[in-house]
Structures are given as structure tokens and as C-alpha cells.
Image (tube, grey):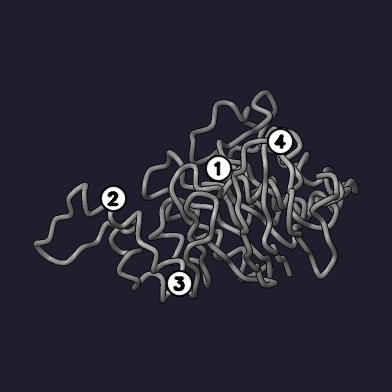
Amino acid sequence: MLRLNNIEVVYSDVIQVLRGVSLDVPDGGIVALLGANGAGKTTTLRAISGLLRSQDGEVTRGWIELDGERIDRLPPEDIVQRGVIQVLEGRRLFQHLTVEENLLIGGVARGRSSRAVLQKDLEQVYHYFPRLKELRKRISGYLSGGEQQMLVIGRGLMAHPRLMMLDEPSLGLAPILVAEIFRVIKQISEQEGMAILLVEQNARIALDVSQYAYVMENGRVVLDGPSEQLAENEDIKEFYLGLTQVGERKSYRDVKHYKRRKRWLG
């Protein structure tokens, strides 16, 4: 459904962040994009959603297609109308509005203004996040971090996207909340047939819920494959899952050597 072909992204005409990134997201599948801070994951999402311009960035090479049609030159509002929604990192809400008012904004953004339609959409969100129904009259700024994360995902769901892009949904959350939110993410994809592109530093849970994954370093995709296979990759185990052979400790010199390895690019 979504295809990135060899894209490069430059900020302020001089800072190159992405270098020949290619990836595919199939219809109805969950794809994970892994990597450390600064690897280029969020920039990749911004390139897809059209939000690069707000950061003085642009796609300078390659192209992005949705169902075979280029979208990399479209404004963000047109990309939203095609069913692509980005849930931004940091749980960005209209904090002075109630939970339900925030959700309704998500529906109106896609042109779903009928009261009956919006009510049906609300019930769908409350089905996945019953806690939000209990809090629907609460001012959003007073919610906990986990409740706010549920709300921003629910607000994205109100737009009935074909592709939802989630940027670090586990950030700052307790492990029990992370497990619950990812359980719902997987459930939404399965029940709604929705494609999900997931940017996440928690590689363990991202590989668990996704079918395919890409690993980024320094603006490039250095490794990709089925999630089950990547979870068994020795480099992934060591540097993303924190697993090494029993009794073996890695020194800083070993880590530096890893960073210079070329076999990931082979």
C-alpha cells in the first residue's frame, strides 16, 4: 500500500538526514521501524505525512507512493484525506479540551461531521479504550501519561485511517501500560484491517506485535526482514534486546567495533 523508494531528506537546504531510505508497508500489516535516537525514524514519518515543511525539510530525491500514486509533493491535509494519519511523539493534545472533544476533532479532521457518524466512531474508540469512556468529560491536561497515549491513538482512530503511523507510543510509560497499549494496537490492526507503521525504541515489544521490521542507523536502513527472524538475529539480540551469550560481557571497544561493521549492509 505504501512504498518509499530511495528517498533522501534535507533540512534547511544543508543538513541531510535520510540517505536512500526504501521501505514498504502492506495493506493491513504492522511494520516496525527501529533504531536509536537520531537514526532518522521520525523524519521518515514526517516525509510520509507531509510534515517536513513545518521543520524546513524536504524530500530531495526518490518518491513516496500510496496505492501507486505519489504523495511526497502533497500538503499534509491532502495526505490525511487519503487516509494517512500520524500520531506524533509526545502525546500532543488540546489540553484545555475534554477527552471527548479531543476525539471529535480527530473525526472532523477527515470530514466526518455527521453527528450519527461521529457517535458511532466514538463508540468504536471506547470499545478499544474503555477507560476513555469513563474519562470522556475529563479535561485532557489532567490525564495520566498512559491515558493521554490512549487518547491520541483514539483521536487518530476517529479519522478511520488506512495507515496509522505511531511515533514512540511507549515513551515514558510504565511496562504494564506499554503492554496494554501494544495489545490494543495489534487488536486494532487485526479487527479494522488497518496498516500500522510503528516507530519504537522498545525493540522487544515492537518485534512482538509487527510482522516485518526495518532497522535504521544514521539515516539509512541497515537491516530488514520478518520480525521473527530479526528477533533471532545476534546483532539485534545484543544491541537492541540486551541479550548476549551467558557469562559474556561486552566492552566499549566491542560496541565501537560493532558500529563499524559492514556486514549489515551486505
Label pair 1/3, CB-CB below 8 angstroms:
no
Dividing the image into 4 quarters, which one contains the N terminus?
A: bottom right
Q: Residue at x 59, y 37 (%)?
A: 135
| Mark 4 element type | loop
Query: Which one is in front, 134 or 174?
Result: 174
Return the disc, 4 or 1, that comes first in the chain's sequence.
4
Label pair 3/4, CB-CB below 8 angstroms:
no
Label 3 is placed on what type of residue? Gly
Residue position for label 1: 149
Label 4 is placed on what type of residue? Asp
Q: Mark 1 or mark 3: which is in front?
A: 3
Mark 4 to mark 1 CA distance (whole Å): 34 Å
Mark 2 to mark 3 CA distance (whole Å): 19 Å
Q: Position of residue 167 (x, y in %)?
A: 57, 47
| Mark 1 element type | helix
Return the disc, 1 or 2, that comes first in the chain's sequence.
1
Query: Which one is in front, 21 or 160?
Result: 21
Return the disc, 4 or 2, that comes first in the chain's sequence.
4
Q: Residue furthest top?
A: 96
Mark 3 to mark 4 CA distance (whole Å): 30 Å
Q: Residue at x 35, y 61 (%)?
A: 261
Dividing the image into 4 quarters, which one contains the C terminus?
A: bottom left
Q: Position of residue 232 (x, y in %)?
A: 34, 73
Label pair 4/2, CB-CB below 8 angstroms:
no
Q: Residue at x 82, y 70 (%)?
A: 68
Q: Mark 4 or mark 1: which is in front?
A: 4
Residue position for label 3: 266
Q: Position of residue 175 (x, y in %)?
A: 36, 48
Q: Residue furthest left?
A: 247
Residue position for label 4: 13
